[in-house]
Amino acid sequence: MTKSPLPLPAQNKNVPEAAGKSVSRLRAADAIRAATAQFGMVTGLTPHAVTGIRSRGDGAWSVLVDVVELARIPDSTSVMATYRVDIDADGELGACERLRRFTRGATDS
């Protein structure tokens, strides 16, 4: 079975061009793919889940990625972390930072 090519960023032709620059709009799904792939390459951590995504208004996105930082037995005691990964309008990694650490079995109160 042949693998499907990755989709290209969506172009929104109804958005006015700012100061003569072309404006491309990256779709949320493409931003998530770019964030998880590039985050994994840079940090060496495997993304476990995407727990949030927010448009930054300029075609860029902030994606919240959860990872297992320290696997333990039982699994519910593994140390997890949430990272914010910023992707620009071209799908390139702009920044990433760890926001919090928690055990897998913990819940927010």
Image: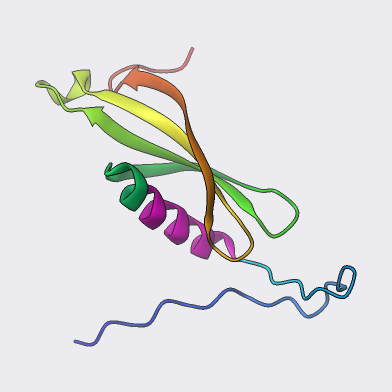
Estimate the x, y position of residue 74 in percent, counting from the top left.
11, 21
Say above or below: 27 vs 101. below
Residue sitting at x 35%, y 19%: 102
Horizontal arrangement in the rendering, residue 99 relative to residue 79 (left or right): right
Q: Is residue 94 visible?
A: yes
Say above or below: 49 vs 98. below
Residue sitting at x 26%, y 29%: 69
Residue sitting at x 49%, y 12%: 109
Residue sitting at x 38%, y 36%: 66
Q: Is residue 33 magenta?
A: yes
Say above or below: 1 vs 92. below
Residue with the most extreme bottom position: 2
Q: Is residue 25 magenta?
A: no
Estimate the x, y position of residue 14 in percent, counting from the top left.
83, 77
Q: Give the residues drawn in magenta, as a range.
A: 27-39
Estimate the x, y position of residue 2 in percent, counting from the top left.
23, 87
Horizontal arrangement in the rendering, residue 54 relative to residue 92 (left or right): right
Estimate the x, y position of residue 30 in percent, counting from the top left.
50, 65
Say above or below: 62 vs 59. above
Q: Main secondary structure of the magenta part?
A: helix
Q: How many marks?
A: 0
Location of residue 75 (image quadrant)? top left
